[in-house]
Image (cartoon, rainbow, N blue to C red):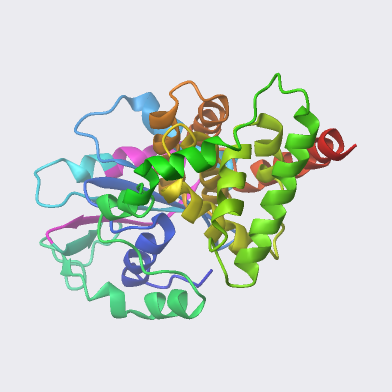
Amino acid sequence: MTTLTSPHDLLAAIPFLIGYHPDQSLVLVSLKDGAIGMAMRVDLPSDIAPESYDLLASHLVREEADAAFIVAYSGESESDAESTVINTSAALIRAGLDIKESLVVRNNRFRSMLCTDLTCCPPEGSEIPDLDTSRIAAEHVIAGHPMPYDSVEGLVQSIAAVPSSFELSWQDEVLAFIVSSDAEELNDLQRDGATAIIDLAGEYREGRGAEDRELVARVIGRMSDIQVRDFALGSHSEESADHYWSMWHQLLRIAPRGFVAPIASLFAAMAYERGEGALAHKALDRALDDDDQYSLALLLRRVFTAGWPPHSFTAMRSELHPKVVATIFG
């Protein structure tokens, strides 16, 4: 992660850290030994209980952070962003964290709550420069990161269903590969599903993506089985993560109603591990809209809300995978 040396750097980095340009938001960015850790965004509250500030601080402590940045985006409203920043700072200090910077952003201007020099930090704030052409933006783009969305609505749209997912013929194709828990050849179907996942990931690695319509339908349909889904959860490595990311992203958008929850949950897990918490939660919204009792989505919601460090989730997933492989392939 690039080094942040100024308020401009911080404001330019946050949209990349959360995936979109925030508004009416409180954003906390954790630091450990000077390195950027997690970025956490919550709606900017009009009133909040004192213990809720301590809860926010506890997430950063669980991340083993030793310092943090605080930024409140109040848009054009008259919300009391200043008091929110002050209360958040107090909670972080009580938790033993150092506050490196705290900013209030309003009407395309920002003001540091830590700076008392009126020559560089006037009461009306300083104008925010074009963040998309900043050094931080250039470094992220060169590193292969996409430009952030203009708003949370853009983020949501990026994982929304495409019209083809509603075609009856496509739904029938996927339905042909559904796995019934009482199927006589259940283990054979599970092996077929796991193999299909590996084969489709290979298609993405070779740049062919979802060209093989039957193979795509097979993967989506077989994911109705929990063992196949759990195999998929741990099937990517650090080297293959980008191929699997592209695969689950596209499959999330084309999966028919009734088959979305497993894929959305997998995509949410990958997003969380990549540090894209906002996208992870929006993917879980899609999963629970498809099946409001889907167990993995409910579990992930609790994990994400509790602020588990992404590396802890990665370790848990890696520990589970060999057991799933043994169950499916013997």
Q: Is residue 69 visible?
A: yes
Q: Nearer the viewer, residue 274 or 234?
A: 234
User: Which region is colored magenta?
Assistant: 85-107
Is 275 on the left or on the right of 113, as rendered?
right
Q: Is residue 152 left or right of residue 234?
A: left
Q: Residue at x 37, y 69 (%)?
A: 147
- Can you give x and y, in whole percent of width and height, for residue 179 in the image? 64, 30
The answer to which quarter of the image holds residue 218 is top right
Q: Decide if residue 307 is in sight here.
A: no
Tell me: 27 left or right of 258: left
Residue at (68% x, 63% y) in the render:
202
x%, y% of residue 309? 60, 43
Q: Residue at x 36, y 44 (%)?
A: 167
Asked whether residue 146 is drawn in magenta, I would say no
In the image, 225 versus 22, the foreground residue is 225
**Residue 194 x/y as whole percent:** 73, 45
Q: How many marks?
A: 0
